[in-house]
Image (spheres, rainbow, N blue to C red):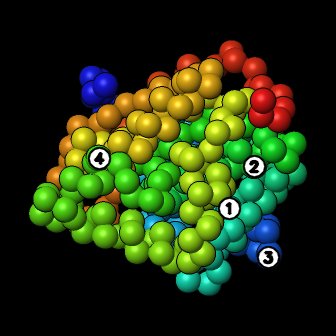
Amino acid sequence: MMADQPLAQATPVLLKTKELEVQGAAGPLGARLYIAADAPGVKRDSLIVFFHGGGFVAGDLEEADEFLRSLVACDPRHVVLASNYTLATVSPFPAAVEDAHAVLLWAKKNKARLNWTGKRMLVAGIEAGANLAAVCTLMARDRGGPALGGQILIMPMLDPGLTSGSMREMPTCSYKAQAADVCAAGYRGYLPNAADRTHPYASPLQSSRLKNLPPALILSAEDDPLRDEAEQYGAKLIGCGIKTTVRRLPPTPLPDVEARNECACKTFALAEIAGFIASLDGMEVPPVSPAM
C-alpha cells in the first residue's frame, strides 16, 4: 500500500548528542546517543536502538546521523541510541548480529546513562542494519531477552538469495542496477559460507519461527530492489499473528545508489515511524517467550 500522508514537519527542537562506548559481543563499540535538550534530566520512556546500513561491509555512525537527528526532532519524547557493529570486512556472520544483541543487553543494564526509564525498547535499522534489527527480535525471543516493544525495519536486507521480483527487475533500471550489485557484494562479504545463507539469523525471511515477536513497522520503497522481500517478510509476520504495518514509500530518485538514509529521511518515513510509535502507546511490552 502506498503511504498517503506527507512527511512530518519537525518543530524546532534543540538536540543533544553524546558519544558513548557500548559493549559488543567481543569488545567495546562506538555509539551515539540522540536526545532532545529541552528537558535536561527528564528520562524518556522509549529508547530506539538503531543500526546503520552499508551492506554489512561498510557504514558507520555518520551515515544515519541526519536521519536520526530528524527522527528525534519529530518526536522528542524518545531517545535514540545508534551503535556500530563489527563489519564483515573484519569478521563475517555472525559477528554483527552477536554485537547487535549484545548492545541491546548493554542498553537494558545502563538505563541511567541513556536518560531512559527502561519502560520500552524498540530496535530499528536501515538496509543491513534493518536485517540486524529483525534478527535481534528473534535472538531476544530465543535467548530470553531483552523484551522489545517494537521493530522498525527500513528497506531491510532479508534475502541473501536475492531472488525477489524487485531485485531481479532492477538490472533493467539504469543506476538502480548498481544497488542490486551493492547488495550482492555485501552478502558475499557477510556470508562467505554458503550454508549460512539459510540461517534464520542471517536470513529472517527464511525463518519458519516468527511467532512471539514484537510489533513491526516495515518500510519499503517503490524504486528499491529490497521492496519485495520487505513486503514478503511483513506478510509472513502478519500470518504469524504479529501486529505489523507495511508501507511502500513513493520513489525518491537520487544520484547516489547508496543514499538510502537520505531517501528515507526525505520521503514519508518519519511520519510513518511517528505514527507507529504513537500506536504503541498504551500497549504493554510483551514478555519474552519462545516461538511456537
Tell me the SS state at disc 1: helix
Q: CA distance from mark 1 to mark 3?
A: 14 Å
- Which residue is the site of mark 4? 165
Query: Relative to 101, is 44 above or below?
Result: above
First in sequence: mark 1 vs mark 2:
1
The spot of residue 96 in percent (x, y) is: 65, 67
Amino acid under disc 2: Met
Question: Can I make out residue 44 in this image?
Answer: no
Q: Are marks 1 and 2 in contact (CB under 8 Å)?
A: yes
Quadrant assignment for the N terminus: top left
N-terminal label among 3 and 2: 3
- State the residue in front, 50 or 166: 166
**Identity, as a three-letter code, of the amino acid under mark 4:** Gly
Q: Which mark is residue 27?
A: 3
How would you rate the neighbour count of disc 2 (Cα within 10 Å): few for under 14, some for 14-19, many for 20 or more?
many
Q: Residue at x 54, y 24 (%)?
A: 238
Camera-side residue of 268 and 212: 212
Percent x, y of residue 90: 62, 84
